[in-house]
Image (cartoon, rainbow, N blue to C red):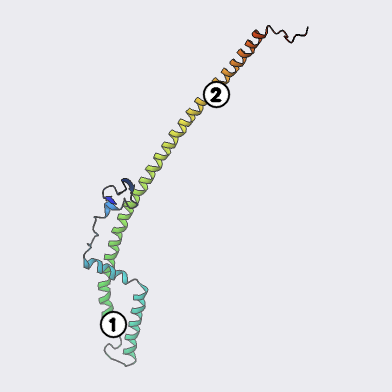
Amino acid sequence: MATNESTGELEKNGMQERHHLRFHLPLRHLSSTFGDDWFSLKAERFARFFGTPFFLIAQTGIVAIWISINVFGFGTFDQYPFILLNLAFSLQAAYAAPLILLAQTRQAERDKAHAEADALHREDLAKASEQRSIFAAEQTAMMTELLKANTALTEVTRDLTLRIETLTVELHHRVLGDGSDNSGVR
């Protein structure tokens, strides 16, 4: 099975069939805004991780443990007002914000490409629907003409049948005589 990249058609057993993603195929060559290299893909995956419930629960647990260790005297590496914890949050925010923006920009580019492909698909559907409507109107007009021709032929057949009946009655009268009774009784 071969795919024609420009038209999005599949060749299968000598027949051409339209591929369901034919409008998305021309957009495949577009690279995302920040590329598809290792860093970009990992940065996007990491940025998406920031919004997961697992991350939020894990971060809350780590902060609770950090504060507990320092408040209850198990360690004194970051005493109240937890400046080291504040620094860690600032560092995380400094890296998280650009990564989240990167992920949003990449997603916006993908959404834009899909929206363009969907618009092309809707236009193709509208064109096909219009062609079907035109074809149906042409077929209706042809059926109307055929019905008119059939009605005319039926009228001609009726006229000919009446004419044949009239000629048959006339011939019958001529063969039997001018309306006389030939039964032999006088």
Which residue does the numbered mark 2 point to in the structure image?
154
The extreme front residue here reads: 184
Question: Quadrant of the image for the C terminus?
Answer: top right
Up/down of 45 relative to 81, above or below: above
Q: Quadrant of residue 79?
A: bottom left
Q: Give the left or right position of residue 110, taking residue 157 as reference.
A: left
- Specify the amino acid type for callout 1: Leu
Q: Secondary structure at mark 2?
A: helix
Q: Secondary structure at mark 1?
A: helix
What crowding class fits label 2: few (fewer than 14 Cα within 10 Å), some (14-19), or many (20 or more)?
Answer: few
Q: Where residue 149 sits: x, y (%)?
A: 49, 25
What crowding class fits label 1: few (fewer than 14 Cα within 10 Å), some (14-19), or many (20 or more)?
Answer: some
Q: Where residue 35 sits: x, y (%)?
A: 22, 62
Label located before the other in sequence (2 or 1): 1
Residue drawn at (58%, 19%) of the image:
161
- Specify the amino acid type for callout 2: Thr
Closest to the camera, between mark 2 and mark 1, is 2
Up/down of 101 relative to 76, above or below: above
Q: Where residue 133 sits: x, y (%)?
A: 43, 39
